Amino acid sequence: MHRSEITIDLGALRRNVRRLRDVLAGSDLWAVVKADAYGHGAVDVARITLEEGAKALCVATVAEAVELRETFREARILVMGPTAGREVAVAREARLELAVLDGQIPEGVPVHLKLDTGMGRWGLGELPELSGEVVGLMTHLATADTDLEFARAQVARFAEATKDYAHLTRHVANSAAALRLPEARFDAARCGVAIYGLSPFGTDPAEDGLEPVLGWQSVLGEVKRLAAGESTGYGRRFVAQRDTWIGIVPVGYADGFRRDMTGTEVIVEGERRPVVGTISMDALAVELAEPLPVGTPVTLVGAGLLAEEHAAVAETINYEIVSKIDSRPIRAKRTVVDA
């Protein structure tokens, strides 16, 4: 018996890719599928995004890229994280492209030089002398989702630094910039979170014409009545003020339902109900309006219940919510639909 079921809606994924391609108005879409496609399944996501016109796949590590290369023999795959030593040889053999972050340009592999225009993380302060291996120039926006003025300043710095290299592929925009900052689109945009129907702004994705791709369901594993004064969970963080029905769901923080999401809501029998008490490693408690049968479905994400809502309660971002859901067979059943 699986503790929960994760559903990946490839139809929604297709529509999100089409929406982004429309927004980009001629700039190429590069699909960011790092971290197992933000927990959505890198192979499935890569296949759909390429079918729908994405021109490249972007990952964080050589290992992620090599895994994709086994399925996608001809796809353009860019490794955006740092690489060194043996990894460069592996990348060369697998026909990968590498982001160069420190000025050391390896031979025999296509590279993209990354400028640090304000992110203050990976990247070069200025462009070195370009070799024949350089096929692209890139930067990373720090505030496209929160501060467009600073993002515009970054775009302007990048445009000035790369103005003599328009023959190379220049790419700057992330999901937020693709949706809000036309001047950041250049030749290609590296979109991740929006592909998955998650808002880069932490709001309802529908505001930008996006549909959530991931759903997460479980069931009531136990239903019990607490008398006034009785509690549920570690630390007695929830003490019943009156006779109260409690449903126990066999999902906890080891499954990705974070400990700091107490107070969020889930859907039971079509009704939103509060998560109460301390979330355990393998269980959470839901306050019910009435006794319900064991096995009653519980929606943790989906059916209008957004990852963005859970993120707001946990004071984090939707990226973290979905990428931390444990989709291994020992924890969850994973169902992929393409409707």
Image (cartoon, rainbow, N blue to C red):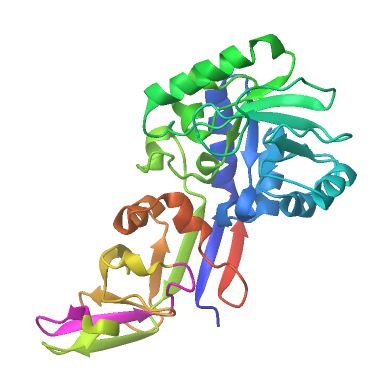
In the image, residue 141 above or below residue 193: above
Residue 126 covered by magenta stretch:
no
In the image, residue 267 above or below residue 302: below
> Which residue occupies the foreground of this view, 336 or 95?
95
- Badge count: 0
Q: In the displayed orientation, state which residue is furthest to the top.
A: 164
Position of 48 with respect to 260 (left or right) is right
The percent position of residue 276, horizontal first and vertical second, equals 25, 73
In the image, residue 160 above or below residue 32: above
Tell me which residue sits at (69%, 46%) in the image.
46
Query: Magenta segment, which residues?
Result: 237-256
The percent position of residue 239, horizontal first and vertical second, equals 16, 82
In the image, residue 331 above or below residue 72: below
Position of 118 with respect to 224 (left or right) is right
Tell me which residue sits at (55%, 28%) in the image.
173
The percent position of residue 196, horizontal first and vertical second, equals 53, 46
Position of 207 with respect to 123 (left or right) is left
Residue 275 is at least partly visible in this image: yes
Residue 233 is at least partly visible in this image: no
Tell me which residue sits at (79%, 32%) in the image.
105
Residue 240 covered by magenta stretch:
yes
